[in-house]
Image (cartoon, grey):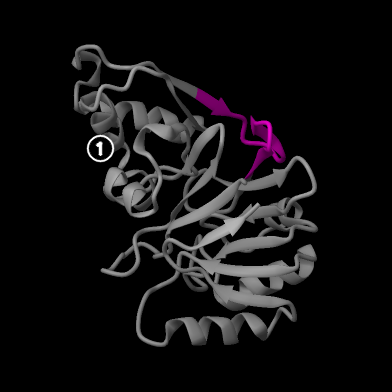
């Protein structure tokens, strides 16, 4: 069965119980990692995901809380003897900077380094990112401080549709991306430039006609989950929950 594992839920500042926001889509064909902060090999192990099963990496945008773990991911894969290619997907703005970052580590001089294939996505709505036997992933640009994409994951045979807003202000492309989805995973950093509050996330969920709203990329703290749910319920009458680290969602 295909499942989405939430590897982290925190906004920009993680704590002992919340890693920065990222997730993994797991099925028999391998693992698609969505963003890559922190120390990937440790988090994947905690989630019960074999490190060598990651074949695809989607980077939503080039901010430290979404890309800081990429050098460690690549170095650890190399040191553990990986030979299979890793495919990395993202906007040109992101992948160009990712290649520059790896250049500072002189990765072109790492002996017997495995192939890395970069797939640059157009900054347009409903772009096909990946098509697997059990699911399809589409991307659309959202409204953040730098070029950023949200993702729509659709099960091929009778399963769920899950949409991830990524970091964004409320905007029409997010509504269109989430239209009719079973679950909208929407950020709730607050009503600041480039981000959304839980109440604004609820309004997006209502307009998109989704069944369930799952809040993510939030500021951690005591009783924060209760407050976030209450705020979202002001604008959305459907089911609302707050994502937790290492939770699993069947697709």
Of 249 and 22, nearer the camera is 249
Q: Closer to the camera, 143 or 30?
A: 30
Q: Is residue 64 visible?
A: no
- Residue at 40% x, 42% y is 62
Image vertical order of residue 191 relative to residue 172, above or below: below
Q: Please tell me in which quadrant of the rendered image residue 17 appears.
A: bottom left
**Percent position of residue 175, x then y:** 73, 58
The image quarter in which residue 232 lies? bottom right
Query: Which segment is the magenta one?
Result: 119-140
Left or right of 250, for residue 59:
left
For numbered disc 1, what is the local secondary structure?
A: helix
Decide if residue 85 is in sight here: yes
- Magenta span includes 138: yes
In the image: residue 250, left or right of residue 36: right
- Which residue is drawn at the image coordinates 59% and 61% (left, top)? 185
Q: Is residue 251 left or right of residue 12?
A: right
- Residue 246 percent coordinates (x, y): 43, 61
Q: Position of residue 247 (x, y in %)?
A: 48, 63
Please state the horizontal and vertical placement of residue 27, each as a whole percent of the image: 56, 40
Task: Please tell me whether residue 241 is drawn above or below residue 49 in the rendered image.
Answer: below
Mark 1 lies on residue: 72
């Amino acid at each position: 069965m295909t499942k989405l594992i939430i590897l982290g839920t925190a906004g920009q500042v993680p704590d002992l119980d919340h890693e920065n926001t990222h997730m993994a889509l797991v099925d028999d064909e391998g693992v698609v990692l969505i963003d890559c902060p922190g120390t990937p090999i440790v988090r994947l192990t905690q989630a019960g995901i074999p490190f060598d099963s990651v074949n695809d990496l989607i980077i939503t945008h080039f901010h430290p809380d979404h890309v800081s773990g990429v050098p460690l991911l690549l170095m650890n894969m190399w040191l553990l003897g990986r030979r299979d290619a890793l495919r990395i997907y993202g906007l040109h703005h992101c992948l160009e900077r990712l290649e520059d970052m790896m250049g500072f580590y002189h990765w072109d001089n790492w002996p017997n380094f495995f192939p890395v294939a970069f797939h640059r996505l157009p900054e347009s709505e409903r772009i096909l990112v990946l098509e697997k036997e059990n699911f399809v992933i589409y991307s659309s640009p959202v409204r953040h401080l730098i070029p950023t994409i949200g993702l729509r994951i659709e099960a091929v045979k009778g399963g769920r549709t899950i949409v991830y807003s990524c970091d964004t202000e409320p905007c029409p492309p997010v509504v269109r991306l989430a239209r009719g989805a079973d679950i909208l995973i929407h950020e709730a950093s607050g009503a600041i430039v480039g981000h959304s509050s839980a109440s604004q996330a609820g309004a997006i969920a209502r307009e998109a006609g989704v069944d369930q709203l799952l809040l993510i990329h939030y500021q951690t703290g005591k009783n924060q989950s209760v407050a976030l749910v209450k705020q979202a319920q002001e604008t959305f009458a459907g089911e609302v929950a707050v994502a937790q680290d290492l939770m699993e969602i069947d697709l």
